[in-house]
């Protein structure tokens, strides 16, 4: 098993993967994944206007809002892409321990997307959006000693 620690910082638009070989060491960026569809306005994500819900007899009525579920769908799609990348890298022994940082809502979506073997190597989760930070600033937001599973 690899002794490399991967740190994944993600939000619904960007996922950046950093790595270090020592729990106290500096980190280097190894990969960036982008999902620009999550940045598009909700109205642009669907091709038609919201439908009308028939709550009473007669024309009109309040519009239903499928756009909110479209953003959730895009977040789930990106989380699945991140999870597949992490599972593939784990299978290739590119890392042995995983640290994940993401905003609370996206962290939950990402957690659900991870397979059981990848979930087993997660040693730390931070519910913060740190995806905009460079390696040096990110390292300052992480615990001094990154947890590593000993196997």
Image (cartoon, rainbow, N blue to C red):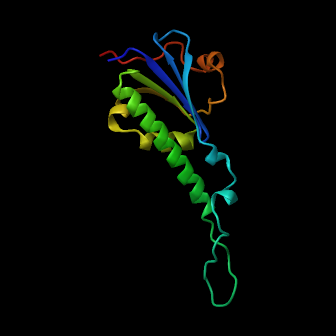
Above or below 95: residue 87: below
| Residue at the image point whose x is 33% and y is 33% from the top | 117
Q: Position of residue 127 (x, y in %)?
A: 55, 34
Is residue 121 in view?
no
Vertical position of residue 94 compared to residue 47: above or below: above
- Residue 149 placement (x, y as % from top left): 36, 18
Asked whether 53 or 145 is in front, the reply is 53
Q: Residue at x 70, y 83 (%)?
A: 60
Which residue is rendered at x = 62% and y = 48% of the image?
A: 37
- Residue 120 at what x, y percent from top left? 35, 30
Left or right of 98 on screen, residue 67: right
112 versus 136 height, above or below: below
Q: Is residue 145 left or right of residue 54?
A: left
Quadrant of res 84:
top left
Depth order, front residue of 99/92: 92
Displayed quadrant of residue 104: top right
- The quadrant of the image that shows the N terminus is top left
Can residue 141 be seen at all in this image of the molecule? yes
The vertical placement of 7 against 47, above or below, is above
């Amino acid at each position: 098993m690899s002794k490399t620690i991967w740190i994944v910082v993600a939000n619904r638009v960007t996922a950046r993967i950093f790595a270090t070989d020592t729990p106290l060491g500096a980190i280097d960026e190894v990969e960036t994944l982008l999902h620009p569809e999550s940045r598009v306005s909700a109205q642009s994500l669907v091709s038609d206007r919201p439908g009308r819900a028939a709550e009473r007899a007669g024309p009109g009525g309040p519009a239903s809002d499928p756009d909110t579920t479209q953003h959730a769908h895009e977040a789930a799609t990106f989380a699945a892409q991140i999870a597949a990348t992490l599972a593939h890298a784990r299978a290739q022994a590119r890392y042995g321990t995983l640290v994940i940082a993401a905003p609370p809502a996206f962290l939950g979506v990402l957690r659900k997307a991870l397979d059981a073997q990848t979930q087993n190597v997660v040693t730390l989760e931070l519910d913060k959006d740190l995806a905009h930070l460079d390696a040096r600033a990110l390292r300052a937001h992480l615990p001094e000693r990154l947890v590593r599973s000993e196997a």
